Amino acid sequence: MAGLLSFLSDISVRPPEIAGPLAQLMESKYKLKNLKYPSDLGANDKGHYLVININVQKSTQFKNDINVGAAARRFDTGPGGAGVTSLLSTVSNAADTVKEAAASVKATIEKEIKKYTGEAPPSGTPGTNIGAASSAIDKNLTGIIKNIGDGVRATSQISTVIYLYMPDTLNFDQNQQYSNPSLAGLASGIASGGQSIADAMTSGGSTDEKMSKGVSNLTPFAAKIFFDAFGGKMGDVLFTAGTGLVQNPLMEVLYTQPAFREFRFDFMFYPRTEAESMEVQKIISELRFHQAPEGLSSSNGFFLVPPSEFNVSFYYNGRENPNIPKLGICVLKGLQINYAPSGFSAYEVPGQSATLGGTGMPVAIQLSLNFMETEIKTKSSFNAEDKMNGLPHRSSSIELGTPTEVQASRN
């Protein structure tokens, strides 16, 4: 590859003047593992960049990365932490059931041994072993319950930091989910039919005319009830064929729930040197590794440890850019790697075998990252971000406190 790229030797590239985290983290006491593309990212003409921090699960069996602290993400518990309180109560009850079962088995074994020997079982018998196991399980369950009670996600940030150039598109789609329930049914049909008779009787004309009009108005309702007895679509077809009418679905729009925000970032890698090719390979390897789950060896693969989580932020000249909205902690739902985005072409040096980052390295690689936030964004979330950025923000009734203060804010 070096021979192929020898034409670049006469091009002088000034060492990048790296600011902010690209300078500070290189000399961090944690010795963070920094991966970046392109190699001169952070130079004066490349001051905008995207930063990806990785948060691994604390239960991971891979301990090669340096842990630099707990990731700041808590369970979305709702007002007053009711979600965790309810969950904690359920887990505690289940733990008590496990402990009671173990204690019952232990007591039964001890009783049988004493029945035939007249003495309590010596240490090391099955009953006492079960008792020790019960105590160990109790201790472990207590730790698990404490984690739930603390409300903190079981992840911690590691030493790997990935720096990439700003992607071409930054779409922030915010979607809410609504349902369209139909209020049409027997009850609404009866109510509407009764109203149609009332309208007929209050209209002008003789009594006979009113009765005739009432019967005419009521006939479609009677026909609908009759044909509904056929069930399903057949009744609807027969009703429409006979009357030339269709039933109004009487649909409403009801809010159901928010949707998690998703983001797609596309990157094109055109490595210019063998060192830059190796950096690209390392970036892909790191993302691919942390996007995957792992089988828990102590459970023979019955349990999985979830994939890592990610912090994605946007920087300009060493500082986070307040002009781009913040992202919450994300999971990497999709990772697409295209080694031939414009047809396959690779760097080749005649006579050399393929080597990682060298001969055989694709000229272009396309990387697509599909992130999804793990936190629901509410008005409070955006209000807090606006307040932090110095934008006009709103005070909620919770922040104002007393009814008098709330009314004063409205005035």
Image (tube, rainbow, N blue to C red):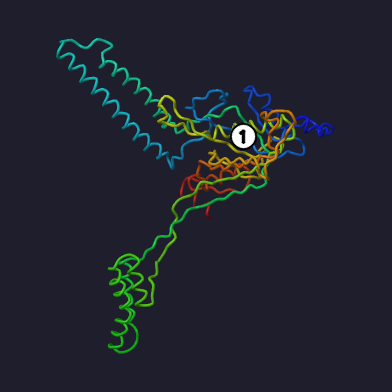
Instruction: Quadrant for residue 86, please give it.
Output: top left
Q: Is residue 186 above or below residue 292?
A: below
Q: Position of residue 4 (x, y in %)?
A: 77, 33
- In the image, what residue occupies the spot 21% across and 18% down? 109
Q: Nearer the viewer, residue 389 or 325?
A: 325
**Which amino acid type is marked by label 1?**
Ile
Q: Is residue 312 left or right of residue 119?
A: right
Residue 9 appearing in the image = yes
Crowding around mark 1 (Cα neighbors within 10 Å: few <14, some 14 to 19, many 20+) is some
Label 1: which residue? 284
Q: Check the image and report above or below for 185 versus 206.
A: above
For residue 271, side relative to residue 329 (left or right)? right
Location of residue 100 (image quadrant): top left
Is residue 216 shown left or right of residue 319?
Answer: left
Place of residue 141 in the rendered image (x, y in percent of width and height, measured from the top left): 37, 26
Q: Is residue 220 above or below residue 274?
A: below
Q: Nearer the viewer, residue 55 or 386?
A: 55
Q: Secondary structure at mark 1?
A: helix
